[in-house]
Amino acid sequence: MFLIDDPFVSDFLINTIRDGNYKIVATKEAKELILDESLNWISEKKAIDLLVKDPDTPIYTNSENSIAWIIKNLESSKLPAQIQLFKDKFKFRELIKDSFPDFFYETVKLEDIQELNVDRINFPFVIKPSIGFFSLGVHIVHNLTEWIAAKKELNYKNLQSIFPKEVIDTSKFIIEEYIKGEEYAVDCYFNREGEPVILNILHHKFSSGTDVSDRVYSTSEKIIRKYKNAIEEFLIPIGNKAGLKNFPIHVELRIDAKGLIRPIEVNALRFGGWCTTGDLSWYAFGFNSYEYYINNKKPNWEQIFKNRTNKIYSIIVLNNNTGFAASEITHFDYDMLVQDFENVLIMRKLDIKKHPVFGFIFTETSLDNEEELGKILISNLRKYIST
């Protein structure tokens, strides 16, 4: 069953729902986003009845906006509590604290941040909304000077969001110790037996030690082979503690030089936001992550890698770091952007005046051409805009 909501649903996901004749809940938001009446639409009442009758029915949401619907309509089921275990970063830290007993974290209200005494907190640390999304309001703080700068940004005006409070709530923040290592994003699901099934692992690249943006995510045969087994083992106790079955998640974690895996956060009932990482598995590895989850299938990685080698597949998030407000930008030259890449697989254009990004591109890059990814990682995108 699919629960579709704003702000975006891809043609790939729509086609998946159509081709598989999968049930899709006929909410007002879904019907406005998808005009195709040939889909297997079911009423909200029927969806609720099905999920209450069979709590292990696989359900996938493309957007965290759907959390509000689940909390409102499925309060008698286990789903709202499971979602909140992950959506609220403080609750997630509480869930896993036995596995990481020395990890520092605490909460602070937005109105108390300006007067917060950080003398007792070791640098570096991270401060972010306890309920957040899309790196909004996230700051890595290495010293007192950076803390002063972060405080200037952490106010109600700067943190206004287009997302509902179930998606991002900036009234409460979590402060936690900075996790060292390289960051990875993982799409997976817990199957009918409660076992984790990896569908993708992407290296989240940053331009600097203070960068928290979502510009470049890359996957490859090398990355999957190196980390798949270790990440599956890491996920087992999380799934057991939360009682997860038929449950998709998108995990952000860091892996240090010694191979120690430490979690940043877990996003429930979905893969990467804006139909990004879930779609990418098709272009990168030739299988459909949504179909695999709904049908309880596992990728045959050995077979996949026979034909998928020596390539890097990336998602480029075109966030607005131009220095210009969206209202000042009159044009984005997507054609020029395409020319700067070896092979653009998909270009998804969005209206920067309605959304927080210009769009997304999926790329295929040869191993000896990683320079193109490095360039877009540090680009301020000004060459592509007109004001």
Image (cartoon, grey):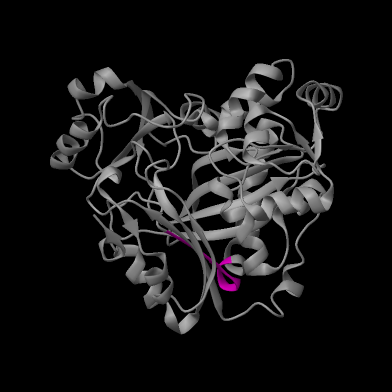
**Residue 39: where, in percent of width, then height?**
79, 43
Q: Is the magenta stretch mostly helix, strand or loop?
A: strand
Residue at far bottom of view: 368
Q: Which of these two is toward me, 132 or 251?
A: 132
**Residue 200: where, in percent of width, then height?**
62, 59
> What residue appears at the point 59 percent right and 23 percent down from the top-left corner?
68
Visible in this render: residue 346?
yes
Visible in this render: residue 272?
no
Q: Does the magenta stretch include residue 330?
A: no
Per the rendered image, the range of residues in magenta is: 216-223
Residue 124 occupies which quadrant of the picture? top left
Q: Does residue 227 sit above or below 34 in this rendering?
A: below
> What residue appears at the point 56 percent right and 39 percent down from the top-left corner?
267
For the C terminus, the image quarter is bottom left
Q: Does residue 4 sit above or below 106 in this rendering?
A: below
Residue 241 occupies which quadrant of the picture? top right
For the N terminus, the image quarter is top right
**Residue 349: where, in percent of width, then height?**
47, 56
> What residue appears at the point 25 percent right and 37 percent down from the top-left corner?
122
Residue at far left of view: 145
> What residue appears at the point 25 percent right and 26 percent down from the top-left corner?
155
Q: Which of these two is toward me, 359 or 114?
A: 359
Give the total of numbered labels: 0
Q: Which of these two is toward me, 373 or 298?
A: 373
Q: Does residue 119 sit above or below 62 in this rendering?
A: above
Q: In this view, does 97 lie to the left or right of 228?
A: left
